[in-house]
Amino acid sequence: MSAAPPATVPWGLAIWSQVRKWASFVRFSHTVFALPFALSSMVVAARENRGWPGALVFVLILVAMISARTCAMAFNRIVDRRFDALNPRTAQRHLVTGEISLTSAVTLCVLSAGGLMMASWGLNPLCFGLSPVALVIVCFYSLTKRFTDYTHVWLGIALAIAPLGAWLAVRGRIDFLAPGSNGFSWGALRGGFLVPLTLAIAVVLWLIGFDIIYATQDYEFDRTHGLRSLVVRWGPKNALMLAFLAHLLMWGVLVLFGVLNTFRLAYWLGAVVILGLLVAEHLLARRRDVRSINIAFFKLNSVISLMFLGIVVVEVVFPWFRLRWY
């Protein structure tokens, strides 16, 4: 009696399975961290046009941001594969198990780098000229844990490129004062490059805080294998105190961002909620169990970034909704 032929998987399910595998490989869901801040910067940069830079620019910004992050994550998985194999928390990652080959990962890294450069070329000459610098910065973070305790700062800088790049994608130039301003003044600063720079600083502080929280999971492993971080240097308790301070400073910078943009009630109500979420994040992080850290790291920070985008859109795109509070 002959054996039954192997069941075939419908082509649609096979494609979806591959999409899920590669999205998991680069943690595509974590795009929700930096992208909302990039889009917020884009909306403010295009404020004169109700926050809309045009369909082509919007699409190219999305392509550039997703490509940059994909390149950085693929590079991270490639250079960290030896440590990932030794760490029980990461031992099931795709390169370690062989589910994705090293050649495929390198190909993805190179193609996504090309995607960023092509999208930047389509935006404007300044973005294209700076795209190689952006690639170096976003990939360099993955190497920092080998030689510096301040790896969290480097990650913050890598993600802070997002709001700066989105601003330059819309404006196409670096204006430290508002275009058309007659000399240095507070009003001139409000429309200049200080706006996205302030948002970038907030992103750096935000990343320092929640990356420290995330790093507490690997405290023993990193300490044993010579990997460096502030958690390893100062211990989890002291590092978490620094993380909380970084998030308080981040919130203060978001206040400055609101002042610079003359935002009103919707923004300030949202800012209060964001402060509450930051406090809740650190209350969870103190427990130091895997479930609490995952909620604090991913879920709460996802809500924070999406809420920030929401209140910026309300303030810029729907000016009729901008209620006065003073």
Image: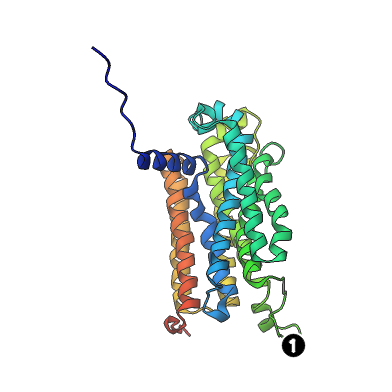
Q: Which residue lies furthest to the left in this view?
A: 1
User: Which residue is depicted at the point 49% across and 50% down?
Assistant: 30
User: Which residue is depicted at the point 45% across and 64% down?
Assistant: 307
Image quarter of the N terminus:
top left
**Where does residue 11 sit, x and y in percent of width and height?**
37, 39
Q: Mark 1 is on which residue type?
A: Asn
Is residue 289 visible in the rendered image? The answer is no
Q: Which element carries disc 1, helix, strand or loop?
A: loop
Residue 210, relative to residue 185: is it above or below? above
Pick the front one: 275 or 46 = 46
**Image quadrant of residue 86?**
top right
Residue 7, relative to residue 234: is it above or below? above
Q: Mark 1 points at which residue?
A: 182
**Where does residue 216 sit, x and y in percent of width and height?**
53, 40
**Where does residue 3 sit, x and y in percent of width and height?**
27, 16
Is residue 98 visible in the rendered image? The answer is yes
Number of numbered callouts drawn: 1
Q: Which residue lies furthest to the front in this view?
A: 2
Q: Which residue lies furthest to the top in this view?
A: 1
Q: Which residue lies furthest to the bottom in this view?
A: 182
**Image quadrant of residue 168?**
bottom right
Residue 224, relative to residue 134: is it above or below? above
**Where does residue 190 sit, x and y in percent of width and height?**
64, 78
| Colouring used for the render | rainbow
User: Which residue is depicted at the point 53% across and 50% down?
Assistant: 210
User: Which residue is depicted at the point 65% across and 72% down?
Assistant: 171
